[in-house]
Amino acid sequence: MQEQEFKSERSRNRIIEAAILALGLVVMGIVLKAAIHNFSDKDRVVAVKGLAEMEVPADKVIWPLMYKDLGNDLSTLYTNIQSKNKTIVDFLVSHGITREEISVAPPEIIDMEAERYLNQAIQYRYNATSVITVTSTDVEKIRKLISGQTELLKQGVAITGGDYRYNTLYEFTGLNNIKPAMIEEATKNAREAAEKFALDSGSKLGKIRNASQGQFTITDRDANTPYIKNVRVVTTVNYYLRN
């Protein structure tokens, strides 16, 4: 009797062990299958780019006022330059420009007789270039003043242009304030492109594998409106694709 009970107990234990082993094999198979799918999914990646653009007004302007003067006597030439510099500074201050926004550079004087490559006769020995620069964050005020600088002609000062070294420059310095929103928009656009690709390929979009933020660029909107800037950034995002 005891021997039969012993055999029966041992038989039940074997059945339980077999069931546990079978269950373990099933679980292992599921895990292996999932691992194989995950491994294969890791090889399926889509790379997309997201663009964000924004137009912003320039918030800083650098305005050089350049004029030339000629003469044969250095002392007289310097006196004329000092007089014209004062005329320009007074004009700027009278239109709301502060002294802190104005810088006066030393005149650049060329002795024409010292230029050996000049063989022809010269009328004036000295050629002077003077530059007074206004740096301001009040862009609109400076733009209006640039349009009205012809008032200086009435006072005997001819502001000249045509030299690329003295072009008016407009800048945008508030990039850090708009960076987060632009990166968010670029990343959103990249995800939309990835979702469209996944849908078209019969896949599902997985997690981000890696991403890189492109360089921000700030350019003039066009040649006629340099005081309006176009800010642009492109982000690159790599997504996993799932079946």
Image (spheres, rainbow, N blue to C red):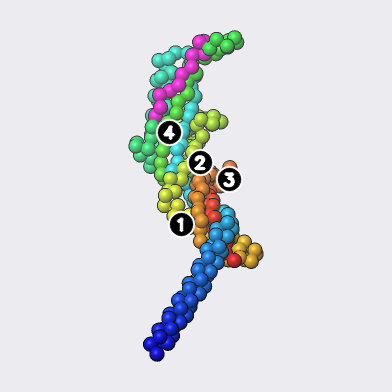
Label 4 belongs to which residue?
Answer: 133
Residue at the (41%, 52%) spot, across then down: 177
Nearer mark to the viewer, of 2 and 3: 3
| Mark 1: amino acid | Ala
With respect to residue 212, does 32 lie above or below? Answer: below
With respect to residue 227, does 70 lie above or below? Answer: above
Q: Mark 3: few, some, or many residues within 10 Å (few <14, many ≥20)?
A: few
Nearer mark to the viewer, of 4 and 2: 4
The span from disc 3 to disc 4 (Cα, nearest Å) is 24 Å
Q: Which of marks 1 and 2 is nearer the N terminus?
A: 2
Label 3 belongs to which residue?
Answer: 222
- Asked which secondary structure carries label 3, the reply is loop
Label 1 belongs to which residue?
Answer: 181
Nearer mark to the viewer, of 1 and 3: 1
The span from disc 2 to disc 3 (Cα, nearest Å) is 19 Å
The span from disc 4 to disc 2 (Cα, nearest Å) is 16 Å
The quadrant of the picture occupied by the N terminus is: bottom left
Residue 139: % across, % down: 45, 45
The residue nearer to you, when weighing 231 against 213, is 213
Nearer mark to the viewer, of 4 and 1: 1
Q: Earlier in the sequence, mark 4 or mark 1?
A: 4
Label 2 belongs to which residue?
Answer: 147
The residue nearer to you, when weighing 34 against 81, is 34
Residue at the (51%, 34%) spot, across then down: 167
| Mark 4: amino acid | Thr
Is 182 positioned to the left or the right of 45 in the image? left
Residue 5: % across, % down: 40, 87
Residue range (magenta)? 104-114
